[in-house]
Amino acid sequence: MNKGIFSCKLGNINLDGCIANASGPRCTSLEELQSLDNSKSPIVLSKSATLEFRKGNPLPRYRDNDLGSINSMGLPNNGIDYYLDITDKIDKPYFISVNGMTYEDTIEIISRIIERDQLVNGIEINLSCPNIIGKGQLGYDPIMMRKYLNGIFDKLNHIRFKLVVGVKLPPYFAFSQFEDISKVLMEFPIDFITCINSIGNGLIVDGEKESVLIKPKNGFGGIGGKYVKPTGLANVRKFYEIFKLNGSNIKIIGCGGIENGMDAFEYILCGAEIVQIGTEYYREGTKCFNLIENELKKIMERKRYTNLSEFRGNLKNI
């Protein structure tokens, strides 16, 4: 019914939908990934894979409320080999989120993906997880980001097939940060960026119990959901402006606080190619993709838009 209305593209992959899952909730096991495969999400994106299995941080490590969520998951996942071994069980374009604990781990993960030769459609390099105890967010360090991307693309430049490559970024706040990070990103043949990851080291308190809500890091964790939507929109918009000004073809995936069709519409209006759903997907499961897409379709019909490109990036200033 909606074929063509939501047509968009990441790298060399044409998609017939724009409401996808974010790496994080409900995408760790084969069962969860197959559920995404049978949903309205146009791609299947895995949990961030480390070189080996990780149990993650101690429980409780996730809580939500009406305004959003706080988490300090600590990258629980089954390790890169698990996510490569199940590629033949997924029909949709399959993207693996990549998060090596060290530079060497990251390069080894990329090497293993290359060895499987065309079994994976794309990767999302996670340079922004705020919840690894003792490990900083590479996305805030342009020098380290350049080192990682140099190493990754040194490997990718020798493969015989096209792998769609994206980078998941932390939220930025100063305009100088956007400029510095954009310069690094535009040095490489990156297909897309995802912004934003959760806002790191937030704190939500239960005043009645006089307690924090999660155990790791004495209650500090990444903030998601409605809390972060204005920051997410700002990041999408600023990168869109910079890429457009510099003639860059890097696409933007918007993520952060999307719960309904209008939220998705606003992200695309700011310049997003597609959007990802995290907190709402955790709460509602795969039905959220269908609900948000249907709401977006009604908004587009009311505004007489026949496809996403007719309003993408056309945010008006006053």
Image (spheres, helix red, strand yellow):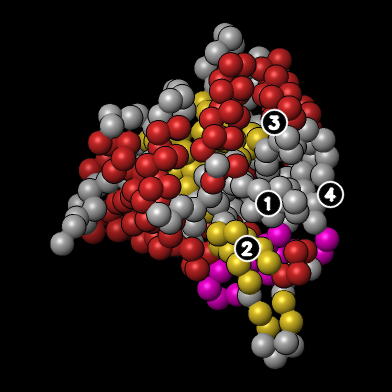
Alpha carbon separation for disc pair 2 and 1? 22 Å
Direction left: furthest residue: 318
Q: Earlier in the sequence, mark 3 or mark 1?
A: 1
Q: Which mark is residue 55?
A: 4
104 up-or-down from 45: above or below: above
Give amino acid for label 3. Tyr
Q: Is residue 50 on the magenta stretch?
A: no
Left or right: 225 in relation to 316: right
Q: Which mark is residue 26?
A: 1
Residue matched to label 2: 201
Q: Earlier in the sequence, mark 2 or mark 1?
A: 1
Examine the rendering and report whether any part of residue 307 can be seen: no
Q: For mark 4, give the secondary structure.
A: loop
Residue matched to label 3: 103
Dot 1, crowdedness within 10 Å: few (<14), some or many (≥20)? many
Q: Assess whether mark 1 and mark 2 are in contact (beta carbons under 8 angstroms).
A: no
Viewer-nearest of labels 1 and 4?
A: 4
Q: Residue at x 53, y 73 (%)?
A: 67
Q: Earlier in the sequence, mark 3 or mark 2?
A: 3
When asked about the image quadrant of residue 287, the answer is: bottom right
Q: Earlier in the sequence, mark 4 or mark 3?
A: 4
Q: For mark 1, give the secondary structure.
A: loop
Q: Earlier in the sequence, mark 1 or mark 4?
A: 1
Give amino acid for label 2. Asn
Q: Position of residue 230 (x, y in %)?
A: 40, 63
Dot 3, crowdedness within 10 Å: few (<14), some or many (≥20)? some
Q: Nearer the viewer, residue 284 or 252?
A: 252
State which region is magenta. Answer: 58-72
Q: Earlier in the sequence, mark 4 or mark 2?
A: 4
Q: Position of residue 134 (x, y in %)?
A: 75, 51
Alpha carbon separation for disc pair 3 and 2? 23 Å
